[in-house]
Amino acid sequence: MKTVLMVAEKPSLAQSIAKILSRGSMSSRKGLNGTCSVYEYPGTFAGQPVRFKMTSVCGHVMTLDFLGKYNKWDKVDPAELFSQAPTEKKEANPKLNMVKFLQVLDAVLPVMNQAHGGEQTVFRARFSSITDTDICAAMARLGEPDHNEALSVDARQELDLRIGCAFTRFQTKYFQGKYGNLDSSLISFGPCQTPTLGFCVERHDKIQSFKPETYWVLQAKVDVDKDRSLLLDWDRVRVFDREIAQMFLNMTKLEKEAQVEATSRKEKAKQRPLALNTVEMLRVASSALGMGPQHAMQTAERLYTQGYISYPRTETTHYPESFDLKGPLRQQANHPYWADTVKRLLAAGINRPRKGHDAGDHPPITPMKAATEAELGGEAWRLYEYITRHFIATVSHDCKYLQSSVSFRIGPERFTCTGKTVISPGFTEIMPWQSVPLEESLPTCQKGDTLAVAEVKLLEKQTSPPDYLTEAELITLMEKHGIGTDASIPVHINNICQRNYVVVESGRRLKPTNLGIVLVHGYYKIDAELVLPTIRSAVEKQLNLIAQGRADFRQVLGHTLDVFKRKFHYFVDSIAGMDELMEVSFSPLAATGKPLSRCGKCHRFMKYIQAKPSRLHCSHCDETYTLPQNGTIKLYKELRCPLDDFELVLWSSGSRGKSYPLCPYCSNHPPFRDMKKGTGCNECTHPSCQHSLSMLGIGQCVGCESGVLVLDPTSGPKWRVACNRCHVLAHCFENAHRVRVSAETCASCEAALLDVDFNKAKSPLPGDGTQHTGCIFCDPVFQELVELKHAASCHPMHRGPGRRQGRGRGRGRRPAGKPGPRRPKDKMSALAAYFV
């Protein structure tokens, strides 16, 4: 019997689809990567009995990256990234072993059994909702993967990688090497990200350059009867000259009557909304629900995979004629919030939705099954509720209302008042926030009638500046100018927030920071096309032509890269123009930070710059040393590195409780081949330094294959042992007076022994004993004193036949690639036990 492998984009989606296709009779097991499950069931495919295997990916399977030295910022000129740097597709998350688990598409073809007669062996199922009908229909009309669409994605990925990395590396190294308070770990550039920031800064510039103007408005009030009056709007609206405004006031204030010149009554309609697409959903989520675009998109995707809504990534606002509108509507017929409205629509006959835009992708976002607030809860419910109300509104009738207006003359000046009366609420019944504003009804009057003038006065007002862009307004601008796609728009907005280019203020308004403002002004000064939306919009059109098979992949890629390569060289040559703006807003490295530790070259104090990225700077040597991020740095007992005489500093993670000393110079310039840049003393293989891995290493980590458990000598009296690669952390020997790593090793597992001096009052040893030497893995006394506190980034460990229970000493001396010694199977590691 042949096997049919099916792959979904998420684990939850695989489970839902398998459940539908197998009608609930499926077996399941965990895949070899421990993350994705495999669902198996018998069935029929192409008229033959087969065994179906349904599984999924978890996030992106592959990612594009540079090869070898081109991934190292300090090894190559960023200009080489445009053409000379080779790229390859790598596993996006190697820990998941996804390629080995799946062998997807191009990778799977060599290991697949070719079908008889050379027929196509890879198919793609297209569906827009997780319902029995849609999934079964998709299986009945399987098609081939679209090669042109894949080429378009590849082109976009390569362009963004080469262009973004080249500009980002140059900017980051140049400006972080000069200024200390940029407060951003990466000065990134992106072909879509930068125009997105440009929109925000453009609005900021309009606010800053705005000059308020005073204007005057003539306001009249007339009496309808003794208990009621009407405010009239001046037909001239406003004037900006005080003397002219005063003249109009003088001409009208003495008049006693207002004469009716014309009346009108007209029935009007407020149109129901177009069907919902991604961009509109994101706009509403931000403006009305207070949800950021990326969070809203993630919430919508969860609702989709759970079967509550149709596919949430679509540009289409038009339902095809064949779309079953009544089916989703019937699902809502018993909902406690809108059952009455839905039942009336079904009984009277639904109204065909307005004709919108058909982008040829997925249908508009539609609720696929009913849900309650208790079922979904929180933000998921609020987004689902809006999607459902919007859908019901699209098949409802327009809102109809009567608009009345009366025109008056007071002296030579004309005034008007208007009123609205709802005839039929239509769709506003389900979307009450869209209701026609209630206005006071107008008096019944005819041309020639007069009303007494109660008051005429002059109001002085001022024009006001625009406010900062809201996320909803920014999304509209990005869609209008073709920046990003419905899927990537949230990512670009999130990126400019993470880079500290903008901050989100109340009302989800985006206010640019000094860094964001200076960058955009600098681009305008050097090459405006780097920040204007025009060039990216043109590139997106070419990428769409590739997807349609109307443009050549290589030609588009080559031409675009050539254009940006020329722009990059001009940008590098003209960087002084942006630098002039930077030096006005930011402080030089030498003037930033506080003295902390001594330089090993000049023995003067280096300054610790705490703003992102944190680093040490020696103004005398003009050298900067990067430090580990997301932690605190302090001087480490004024001890010096035996290799370069730099004073050591201590990095602490804070909430995770890990800390280790490091030499600033060694961390930036590894002295040994087996050391990586950015490492601390807990990974240094110096054979005799008292802070090195060789002296403080205990044994191989129980949670990862490459790490070594290292004693933290600064942690007493709450002593800690931590992995130098992953997040495994163990508390041990609390209140012990002293803990040292012995030169002796365990006879069973070859881990380093520990010499522990316990406080007499709290010693766990029998009698009056306070000193004990033993193995943290094997010694029964020590096993009771070890407690694992944090292992967030480790793979789960399980006991079982052949399980390696303990770990060898390691300590940096083991040849690369050779595993440490194994413990006997009849003993259980105190640390590994916490994973079972």
Image (tube, helix red, strand yellow):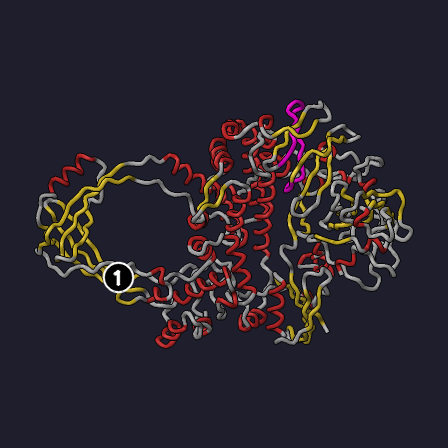
Residue 291 x/y as whole percent: 48, 54
Camera-side residue of 324 and 612: 612
Q: Is residue 40 left or right of residue 406?
A: right
- Residues in magenta? 614-631
Q: In the image shown, does 754 or 748 lie closer to the viewer? A: 754
> In which image quadrant can residue 833 be found?
bottom right
Task: Kindly identify the residue that appears in the image at 87 percent across and 47 percent down.
Answer: 773
Magenta stretch contains residue 624 = yes
Residue occupied by mark 1: 268
Q: Residue 824 at what x, y percent from top left?
A: 88, 58
Check the picture and name the quadrant holding the N terminus.
bottom right
Q: Is residue 480 visible?
A: no
**Dot 1: element:** strand
Q: Position of residue 657 (x, y in %)?
A: 69, 46
- Locate the C terminus by quadrant: bottom right
> Outermost residue, right direction?
747
Q: Is residue 747 magenta?
A: no
Q: Residue at x 38, y 38 (%)?
A: 207
Q: Is residue 257 left or right of residue 351?
A: left
